[in-house]
Every structure is written in C-alpha cells, then in structure tokens.
Image (cartoon, rainbow, N blue to C red):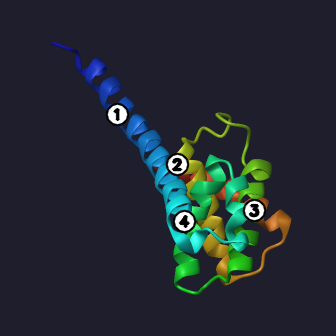
Amino acid sequence: MPSSTEDNSINSQSPIIDRDDEFSQVVFDARKLLKNKKEYQTEEWAWTAELDDGGIFIFSYLLYDYKQQVLSLTRLKESVYMLSLLRHKMLPAEGKSGLMLLEEFQVIFTLYERLKLEDMSWDACEKYIREQITVQLKTN
C-alpha cells in the first residue's frame, strides 16, 4: 500500500500528464482542421503551415475571436505572431518561470484579453506578464 506521500506525488503527476495531453490534443485538432477543412486550404491561410506547436495552440485560442468576427483574418495572423513573440520574449526561459506549459499560455491569453480592452506599451506588457506569473504561481 503506498504511503500518503506517494499518493500525493502520484496525484500531482496526473494533472501534468493531462495538461500535456490537453496541449497536444488542441495542437493535433487544430492541425487536422487546417488540413481537412476546405475553408483553410486557400493561399490566405498558408501562413498557418509555418506555425510551431505553440503558435498553433495560440491560433486555436484566437480562432474563436475570428469566427465571432472580433478579429479579421489579417488581425488574426498579426495577433498569433504577436502573442508567439510575446511568449518567447517576455516569459522566462522554459522551466525558469515555475509555470507549467498551459499556465504559460494562460498568462499570454490573459494578456491578450487585456490588450483587447486597452493599448499597452511593451513595458506595460512585461509588467503585466510578471504580475500574471506571480498570480499563477500563488494559485498553484
């Protein structure tokens, strides 16, 4: 019979695996959608083929706003690239933030939602991301 310490370590590992699976599933589904739906087979969607897994994950999140006509196709593309850049430039190197993969994206998506409401300078974005990392770490 495992000790309660072993139970806690087993239980704490499951959500990490689930989160990685969730990320992979979203990326898989988005790539499948882009490959199989005729709507995305035009030249104006060709830029999506260049996206890495992180970019595809961001694309999946922003696709909702595109479909709700909050973003035009041009703004969708710009926003995906911008959020990918912000993720790579503003978040500490992988593992140094203390955040799991999906938590990193949550920080970026929170920033995106804030940017929809107000213009922010690069410095303000950096400050906001630092604050969100702190919030995420406190809630975990």
Query: Counting residues from the N terminus, which is met first, the one under dot 3 or under dot 2?
Result: 3
Residue drawn at (76%, 64%) of the image: 82
Residue 110 appears at what percent x and percent y? 59, 65
Nearer to us of marks 1 and 3 is 3
Which mark identifies residue 102?
Answer: 2
Residue 46 appears at what percent x and percent y? 71, 64
Residue drawn at (56%, 43%) of the image: 101
Q: Which residue is mark 4?
A: 61
Q: Are marks 4 and 1 in contact (CB under 8 Å)?
A: no
Q: Which residue is mark 1?
A: 14
Nearer to us of marks 3 and 2 is 3
Q: Which residue is mark 3?
A: 81
| Structural distance between the alpha carbons of marks 2 and 4 | 12 Å
Residue drawn at (35%, 24%) of the image: 9
Residue 91 appears at what percent x and percent y? 72, 48
Query: Is residue 136 visible in the rendered structure shown here?
Result: yes
Query: Is residue 140 visible in the rendered structure shown here?
Result: no
| Structural distance between the alpha carbons of marks 1 and 2 | 14 Å
Query: Counting residues from the N terminus, which is met first, the one under dot 3 or under dot 4?
Result: 4
| Structural distance between the alpha carbons of marks 1 and 3 | 32 Å
Q: Identify the image quadrant of residue 11.
A: top left
